[in-house]
Amino acid sequence: MKTLLSALFIVVPAALSSSLLVAEETTEASICEAKDMTSVSYMENLQPNSDVDVGAIYQAKTEQLIAFAEKYNLEDFQIINQDASVSANCCGNYGSQISMNYTVTYKPSYSAFTAFHKYGGTGMVSTYRVGMENCPITK
């Protein structure tokens, strides 16, 4: 019994330390997890003195953005931030305006930036790539 107990004190710590070493080795492995983040803005003029449903406009624009991502095959597309605001009628020129802004992510794609610019119907588009710390440098 003493021999068995002594053997356990040697085997168990050795097994635990070897599994900890394996865990440390796997967490040290560098993984390239780059993603493109794109910000897009839309603005629509609202008729003066109209009782327009700005929530419906906002929802429709969100649905259009999701459909755009599907049409242009933006892999792992996700809306990570969105906001909307309505401005008051200023100086009687256009009535009110609704401004809608989105930040989206997807797998890196230079052609997606072109698609947003040409076909996204946006007033403004900007993009940047994140998570490149562990990625190989490509030309």
Image (cartoon, helix red, strand yellow):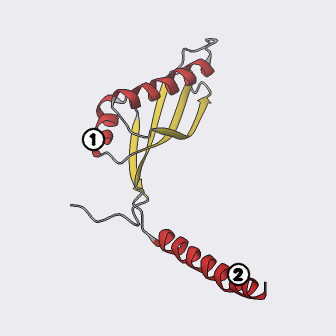
Query: Can I make out residue 92 in this image?
Result: no
Of the residues shown, which amino acid type is indicated by label 1?
A: Ser
Query: Can I make out residue 80 in this image?
Result: yes
Q: Residue furthest top?
A: 50
- Near mark 1 (Cα within 10 A), the count class, few <14, some 14-19 or many ≥20, is few
Relative side of 65 to 118, left or right: right
Q: Foreground: 89 or 29?
A: 29
* Quadrant of the snapshot with the N terminus: bottom right
Q: Is residue 56 above or below residue 118?
A: above
Q: Is residue 135 above or below residue 37?
A: below
Q: Position of residue 34 (x, y in %)?
A: 40, 55
**Residue, disc 1:** 111
* Quadrant of the snapshot with the C terminus: bottom left
Of the residues shown, which amino acid type is indicated by label 2?
A: Leu
Relative side of 138 to 94, left or right: left
Which of the marked residues, 2 or 1, is nearer the chain's N terminus? 2
Give the CA separation, mark 2 to mark 1: 60 Å
- Please name the residue shown 55% across and 27% down the image: 98
User: Circle 1 — which element?
Assistant: helix
- Please name the residue shown 61% across and 29% down the image: 86
- Near mark 2 (Cα within 10 A), the count class, few <14, some 14-19 or many ≥20, is few
> Which of pointers 2 and 1 indicates the residue nearer the eye?
2
Q: Is residue 103 above or below residue 119?
A: below
- Please name the residue shown 59% across and 33% down the image: 84
Count of number-bearing discs: 2
- Tag 2–tag 1 contact (CB < 8 Å): no
**Disc ID at residue 8:** 2
Q: Position of residue 65 (x, y in %)?
A: 45, 29
Q: Foreground: 24 or 44?
A: 24
